[in-house]
Structures are given as structure tokens and as C-alpha cells.
Image: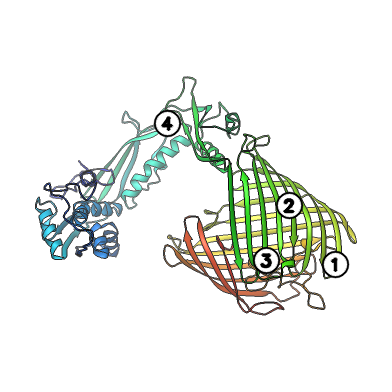
Amino acid sequence: MTRIASGLTCVLLSTGLATPASARWFWEREPASDAQTTAGGKADRGDARHRSAVNLTIDINGGNGDVRSAVQDASGLYGLEQDGAHSTDEVLRAALSERARIIGAMYQQGRYAAIVEVEVAGTSVSNPAIRDAIDAAFARGTVPATIRLTPGPVFHLGTVAVHDPDGRPATVVGAAATGLVVGDVAGSAGLVAAEAKLTSAMQNDGYPLARVTSREVVADHRAVKVDVTYVVDPGRSATFGAVEVRGTDKMNPGLIRRWAPFKAGERYDPAQVAAYERYLRGLEVFDSVRVTTAQAVESDGSIPIIVTVAERKLHYVGASATWSSTDGAALTAYWGHRNLFGGAERLRLDATVSRLFVNATNDLEYRVGFTFTKPGIWSYKNDLTIASHLVREAPKAYTREGFDNTISLIHRFDDRRDVSIGFSPSWSHITDAYGDHYYALFGMPVAGRIDTTDDKLNPSEGYRAVGSIEPVVGDIGDSNFMLLSNATFSAYKALDDAKRFIVAGRVQIGSVVGPSLADTPANDRLYAGGGGSIRGYAYQAASPRDAWGQITGGRSLFVTSLELRTRITETIGLVPFVDMGSAYTESWPNFSEPLKIGVGLGLRYFTSIGPLRLDVAVPTTHEKGDPSVAAYISIGQAF
């Protein structure tokens, strides 16, 4: 038997085959630093200012193009050929680990009979004189290296078995849980991944301390098949026990225990543990959260759950900025408290001024106020939010000064779905194409959200659906009632496994039912055009106008967008896009007006916090006030 790089145990049933050496052996002998001795007791004699070339020859006897690609990806010497070597120790480390790297790459392809020979500076890596040979070649400025590989055949799965520690077939979990299929290629990555699948299957069945104790892989070189056996120890099944909270300071530990999504006595479920940890992280009061099980099941069959947290600083302050060539700049500053009363209550004071640098001072917009959030109302699934803001809006269609207030209760079904209901009184003074208006309105918004995407700022799979409906009462001109509704649906699909090509699409619709267009509050009318709508058109410019060409807005909206998000390098992407749509005077989109279309190209710079976005767009038909070209900068994708 021979231990190999992937941790498999391989029994060779034929003779005359080269037995792979252990990758672990090479890594354990790897020098900790360039100054440490590596071979022959000699210290590194390389000069960091000197770089020598590595000339690598890869000689492959058999296989296909995937073999050469796998060798190049795994090879340390290939990397040095591309970048140059700074020291002899750097070359030596790569040389000593080279054979194990390539053997491991072949195992991933299911090639368990691969024969690999590595020479550097004309000397086999197993030769004790390898260091001296590398030293001499390095000093000359060029280090020749050769990899000779006979990859051998691709092995397929023969049998897959799961046993208890006593050697009998396991009763808690079976071979199907491994995800392995007899007859498939026996790649080592899949054999190793099967362990995690077995462990997960046992834990999902209520065994919190389940584990795979060993894995044996037998390669039959005559039959070119691999038989694999896993030995599992499920431990005892368990129910949820008491929750122990560690690390709290200002936070009330009793509330943390109360917010657990499970009750003592319920069957253990790792999905509930993971959901608990995600919820606690989402409270924004902790720097770190770890939810784990105890090391043993109690005598009563329960297992304690341990919550370990580190609290963040109570206060924070920040600012942000956005800019577009049509809408101008927007600056936001905010201050917040993360744990106001010891129950993760969040208070945020914020102020925003927008439409800077493209408008006169009296046409600027602002929004100043606060938002208070109380999590865990009645249960961990409910949050209460209270918000109040003084606002001034001054787009081309109207000017509004007002006071907006919202009290809402949000209920989360899970991480991806939630609904909310609220009460929203507001007071406004509005000047628009139809004159001066004063409104005192009382709304009851109801909203819902579904988000199945894999990333908030840069999704590549899944969809998002957001919808709201809000009945509003008050003195609204010729009506005392108004019904506002909006819906947005977006979907994302990667076209390749590497997710370098992603198709993204969005559809927005909206409607106002009740008052006439003139009596509908201008801030509740619907508009098209701008960075969040139809790029290339000025803000609100793709909307209905009166006889004098002044924007009035509409009572319905339809906008759709399509993007092809391409990733050119790991940090740079290009995004051709098209937006189209319009707003309409009737309560439902009747497409009486031609669709306004904006086309453009975006540049993305990918960072750890999300992509930085620069979009440049042009309108296909110009409206009054439209630029010939418009640009938009922000963090995150357009939708």
C-alpha cells in the first residue's frame, strides 16, 4: 500500500508498476525559509536581486491535451519558467515537490498508473547531488528541467461501499450518499469529496458527531477499475439541547438564546445551526459568530449548542458617493449605533445631497433623517423598522418638499424570502406642470421579496423578484383613494463553468390606479430614463410630456434591460447592454408610445467587496435635454 497526495490508500494489484511517492513527505521536508537548509546542509546561495531562467521540457507519452494542461497547472517548475527563479532554494522546492504535484494531477483525472520522472539541471530529483547541480546551473543563468510523463489509462469506478467500524455495511447511510456512480471516471477529487457528502448525510439524519474514519481505494490495474470503501462512525443521534452563549459584553445573551430557530428537544438539524449563525451575523452587532455543537451527546440524548461571538464597536460613521453625467453627483454621510439597548437595536442617522454639479443650488435634492430597527419582535423572524426623513426632490418633472415616515414589520420566511407590511404617513408640497399641490397622505405598503441569486453584488445564477402594493388615502384631487403597485424581476445565467460569461435580464412594471394624472402626486407618478432605468437618457426624460414639452410622468411603467457580463481577466470585465421602455399616461402600459432604447458598454473592475461599475450609454432617439452620451459610476452591477 502507498499513501498518495489526495490521501487515498491505493493497493496495486499488478506488478512492475512505479509506485508514486508521497506528496506529504515532500511538503514536510520543505524548507521553512530561504535561509534554512534544504539539502546537503547548504544554505540558500541565491541572490534576491538575481533571477535565472528555467527552461522546462514536458515530454508526455500518451493521454490528450487535458493531460498537458493539468501538468502545467500543477507544475511548480512551469510557473518558474513563466516568471523566472529568484533563488536556488526556489528551484529546489519546486523540483522536490514536482513529482507529487503531477501524480496528484493525474489522480484527479483518474489516472492511477501514471509514471513520472523529473530531472533538473541534468540530475534526477532523487539524486542527493540535486542541490549542487541546481546551484551550478543557477549561477550560469539558465536551469534546464525535464518532466517525462506516461499518464497511463483512465480508471473507472468498480464498486463503492460504506461500512460501519466493525466492517459490516453501514445502516445509517449508504453508498448512494457519496454521489459516486459505478462506471464513472474515478477522479480523486470526487473520491475525497464523497467523504463530506457522507458526513453531511449522517448529520442531516440527526447524527451531529458523525464522521468518516477511513477511506480505502483499491486500483485494479488489469481491469482498470477502482474500488473504494468508506468506514463511517455516525455516533449517537441527538436532539437540540441548551444554547450556551460565550463572548457577549453589551449584547443580552438571553436574547441570543431566544432567537435560536430551533427548540430544545427537536431533532438535531445542521441546516438550523447554519441558519442560526447566518441570522446572528446579519444583526451587524458582531465581528465574528461561530455556532457549533458540543463534543459529546448528553446522557439524555441532547447535544448542547455553543454560540461564540465577538462584538463590534458600538458606533460607526461613514460616507459614500455616486456620480453620473446626467444625474450629477450624490454625497451621503451617516452615523450609526449597532446595539442601542442591548438587543442589537440599530439606529442610523443619515444625510444625502444629490444632483450636485449639474444643477443650480436651488435645484439640489436632499434627504435627512433616521432609521431605527428592532430585531426579533415576537420571534427571530420579525423585525420592526421606524424611519422618518425630511426630503427635497427637484428632478426635471417637479419640485417636492416633504416629510416621509414609515413604520413597518418585516417577516422572514428564510434567507431568501420575506414580506413586510407598514404604515406610511407623509406630507408634501409639490410644484409641477399642473401647478402647486399640498398632500397629506396615509399609505399601507405591503411588499414581498424572493432572492435565489448566488451573490448580492455580482450574481451569476438565480433570480430576484420584488413586488409591492400600497393603498393610499387622503385628499388626492378628484379621488380620496390611490393604489400604487410595482414589480421588478431579474434573472442571471452563467454560460460557462468558469462564469466568465453571464447573461442578465431585468423587467420592471408599475401602475397607479385612482386619481387622474394631474391629481396624482408627482412623486408617486412613474418615470423612465436615467442610470437606474434606461441608461443614455436623462433622468426621467423617457416619460410623458405636456403640450409644452415639460415632463409630467405617467401612471404606468414598463422597462426592460439585457446585459452580457463578460470577464476578460480576473479583475477586468466588459458588459455590452441594452435598456428599453417608457412610462405611459394610462394606469396600465398600453405601449401607445414607441419604446425608448439606450445602448452602451460597461467596464467592470472586480474587487473583494464587489465590482466597480462604469457604464457609458447613448440614446437611440434623443428627447429634449438628453445628452449625446451618458456615463454612470457606482459599486455593484446595474441590477
Residue 436 percent across, percent down from the top left: 86, 65
Are the residues tagged 1 and 3 within 8 Å (C-beta)? no
Whether residue 28 is visible here, answered yes or no, is yes
Q: Residue at x 69, y 58 (%)?
A: 487
Q: Which residue is mark 1?
A: 518
Mark 4 element type? loop
Mark 3 element type? strand
Please, is residue 356 above or below residue 448 in the view? below
Looking at the image, residue 238 sits to the left or right of residue 315; the answer is: left
Q: Label 4 to label 1, Cα distance in Å?
A: 67 Å
Q: Counting other residues with Cα less than 10 Å from the Cα at mark 4, is it few (<14), some (14-19), or many (20 or more)?
A: many
Q: Which residue is mark 2?
A: 389
Q: Residue at x 9, y 53 (%)?
A: 129
Residue 350 percent across, percent down from the top left: 66, 52
Q: Which residue is mark 4?
A: 209
Give the residue type that dot 2 points to: His
Give the residue type that dot 1 points to: Ala
Please, is residue 195 above or below residue 391 in the view? above
Are the residues tagged 4 and 3 within 8 Å (C-beta)? no
Q: Counting other residues with Cα less than 10 Å from the Cα at mark 1, is it few (<14), some (14-19), or many (20 or more)?
A: some
Q: Which residue is mark 3?
A: 355
Give the residue type that dot 3 points to: Arg
Q: Residue at x 47, y 66 (%)?
A: 573
